[in-house]
């Protein structure tokens, strides 16, 4: 079989070693006679899996003791409602930064629960650049400030942390969590769907400062109350047990590779390889401002967009999968999460060079 | 290794053939070069997996075309809020039958959104029997009638369908779905968490008559709107893709075994074997009324409850796992879902006989 490299934006490539371990343990986890999928979530076997996953995540991200780590369901879309429902805490307005498609989804849902103050928008720059903080119009009465630190579709990443004083900072880290160190203490709440850098779809991780939870707005479903999940160690209801197990394997894989500082070096190397090549030729183009180029999701175009279909067809034939850009933007997009090996990016660049040689 | 039989109430035993297939396909699904976990939910490979799973479920349950099949997240607990949020449709009251712990959870959550009329309660019978419909006090103005057709903890099952006229009937089938044929046309909405008879935890199946959806109460999170999921073929957000894949394998396994009428015969045989033995001796006891004895979850006690610990210890040593009763009820509970082979129940009964011989 051809060597496959999967550039999907999510669900996305997982470390091969992790999939191999999952396959080998599928029918019998640690001589328990059970698959992880068959274990009671309240049994000692699964409790040990969940506790170890949490401990490893805390170690990887240096999560302080006054932050709760929650394993939830529903992805970022559920968080878009849960955040205002839990964090308004008697206030009626929240600040949101508009960086593109995912930020706008968060804004639209929040607007159903409170007045949304858009502190700044990248719309005038066609979402190719994130507004500098000097241009933001923060509201000191905001319940919180929300932003999207990596736009999976647009391909923008913010490498700086907004400074918002005592107002809690809330961030959607879905598509770059675990790709580099972050200072958790700067945040009130960090959330991420698992299906990019953590594990399979259906698991959502929330890291929340414990003093912020416990006050929900009227009508909040019990399942949307962070405090309920925190008080029950994410076992208020049956959690997505297999997803937590897979996430735990990915955390161990990351630790074995040296943790987040080490993986960041690899991610810098991989993304630089692709951006440097794109910048070296007029045949391809990256639309994103230099300081906001995502290391995880790299959209690019071909000078003559009539070549897109042929590019994707040939790439697919060579085992370079899921390079088609998001339907809203067109063009191409290479998502190169932690689990994408350097060899995958090298293969992509080699293919792009060949394609340019023929069609350039 | 000892042959293991896993009597967990959920997450629970899965068919061995299904786990074997999942293991063998873990790194490469159908020569795609990808794990199912790595596939974009919008790619043709995963779309084919999800479509086939839905078609097989429709075939197994004879689901008419005017019912939507939704693959959601959040388990029964999320449904406890979603049902009133979606089905009140301008009314302010709903009917609920109280059959025990799970029914009460549904009632408590619904009471946050409407007036709950408890049509009848098994409390006076210590939840050992389901009240006959002649005793129910139905409210003709109710938005819907909700009941729990199998109480996983209490061990009660209802083998008849309530007749509620034109009021939509809503049922929590989490712990007996797919164990026997049901007439879907009698229901407005059927829901079930996957982690008993369908697949891994983290997937919830909702079957809903399409004319009932589209009117939510104010403040309903978009993720809790059935219509949004229906209009997007359960892909409004990233669904729990691996859970849907596993459910699809279980549906194929059921079809290969002859479907729901065939599996019902096996379930009758398995449960009768255990109940008949329990009834043949004074050493063990089933607390449940004959007509409501669940075929899926079988709680039982030992005459001298001081023997419980020894019973569980010896059972575990013989590979009979997770027989401890729910913490709220004590005693023992054997959950024998579709995937529990007859041999597992035979092994349990043989062990119970031995134990009685020594301690009786």
Image (cartoon, coloured by chain):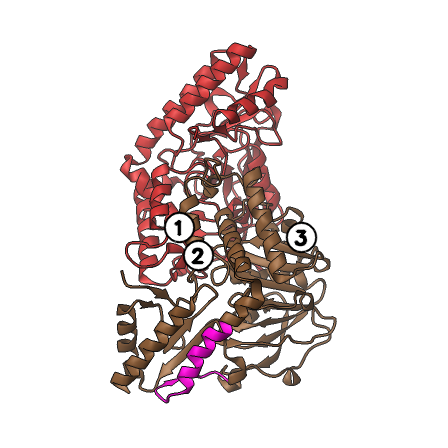
Chain colours: A red, B brown
How far apart are the alpha carbons under marks 3 and 1? 29 Å
Looking at the picture, how far across and down is residue B149, in whole percent? Answer: 56, 72
Residue under disc 3 on the same chain as residue under disc 2: no
At x 57%, y 17%, the residue is: A302
- Say the numbered circle drawn on residue A244: 1
Q: Residues within 10 Å of mark 3 (few under 14, many from 20)?
A: many
Answer with left or right where residue B219 lies relative to residue A50: right
Q: Nearer the viewer, residue A119 or B8?
A: B8
Which residue ends up furthest to the bottom in the rendered image?
B282
Residue under disc 3 on the same chain as residue under disc 1: no
Question: Which mark sits nearer the N-terminus, 1 or 2?
Answer: 2
Looking at the picture, how far across and down is residue B296, in whole percent? Answer: 48, 71
Q: Residues within 10 Å of mark 2 (few under 14, many from 20)?
A: many
What secondary structure is found at the residue carrying circle 1?
Answer: helix
- Marks 1,2: beta carbons within 8 A: yes
Answer with left or right where residue B303 lies relative to residue B72: left
Q: Is residue B312 above or below residue B64?
A: below
Q: Residues within 10 Å of mark 1 (few under 14, many from 20)?
A: many
At x 56%, y 24%, the residue is: A313
Chain letter of disc 2 in the image: A
What secondary structure is found at the residue carrying circle 2?
Answer: loop
Name the image quarter holding the N terminus of chain A: top left
In the picture of the structure, the residue carrying the numbered disc 2 is A239
- Marks 3,1: beta carbons within 8 A: no
Looking at the picture, how far across and down is residue B37, in whole percent? Answer: 46, 43
In this picture, which residue range is highlighted in magenta? B267-289
* Whether residue A282 is visible: no
- Say the numbered circle drawn on residue B65: none
Q: Nearer the viewer, residue B130 or A66?
A: B130
In the picture of the structure, the residue carrying the numbered disc 3 is B227
């Amino acid at each position: 079989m051809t060597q496959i490299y999967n550039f999907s934006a999510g669900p996305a490539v997982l470390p091969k070693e992790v999939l191999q371990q999952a396959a080998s343990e599928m029918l019998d986890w640690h001589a328990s006679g059970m698959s992880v999928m068959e274990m009671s979530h309240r049994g000692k076997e699964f409790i040990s899996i969940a506790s170890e996953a949490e401990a490893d995540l805390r170690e990887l991200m240096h999560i302080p003791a006054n932050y709760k780590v929650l394993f939830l369901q529903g992805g970022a879309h559920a968080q878009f409602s849960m955040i205002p429902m839990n964090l308004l805490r008697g206030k009626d307005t929240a600040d949101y930064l508009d960086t593109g498609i995912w930020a706008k989804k968060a804004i639209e849902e929040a607007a159903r629960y409170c007045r949304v103050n858009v502190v700044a928008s990248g719309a005038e720059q066609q979402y190719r650049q994130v507004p500098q903080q000097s241009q933001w119009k923060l509201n000191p009465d905001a319940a919180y400030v929300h932003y999207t630190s990596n736009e999976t579709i647009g391909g923008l990443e913010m490498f700086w942390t907004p400074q918002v004083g005592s107002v809690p900072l809330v961030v959607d880290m879905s598509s770059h969590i675990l790709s580099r160190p972050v200072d958790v203490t700067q945040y009130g709440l960090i959330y991420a769907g698992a299906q990019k850098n953590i594990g399979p779809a259906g698991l959502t991780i929330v890291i929340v400062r414990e003093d912020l939870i416990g006050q929900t707005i009227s009508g909040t479903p019990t399942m949307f109350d962070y405090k309920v999940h925190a008080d029950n160690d994410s076992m208020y209801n049956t959690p997505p047990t297999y997803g937590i197990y897979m996430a735990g394997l990915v955390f161990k894989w990351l630790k074995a590779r040296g943790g987040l500082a080490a993986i960041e070096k690899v991610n810098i190397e991989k993304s630089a390889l692709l951006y440097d090549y794109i910048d070296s030729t007029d045949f391809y183009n990256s639309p994103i401002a230099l300081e906001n180029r995502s290391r995880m999701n790299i959209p690019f175009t071909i000078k003559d967009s009539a070549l897109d279909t042929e590019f994707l067809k040939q790439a697919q034939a060579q085992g370079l999968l899921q390079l088609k850009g998001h339907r809203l933007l067109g063009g191409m997009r290479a998502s190169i999460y932690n689990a994408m090996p350097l060899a995958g990016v090298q293969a992509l660049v080699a293919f792009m060079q060949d394609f340019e040689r023929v069609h350039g």
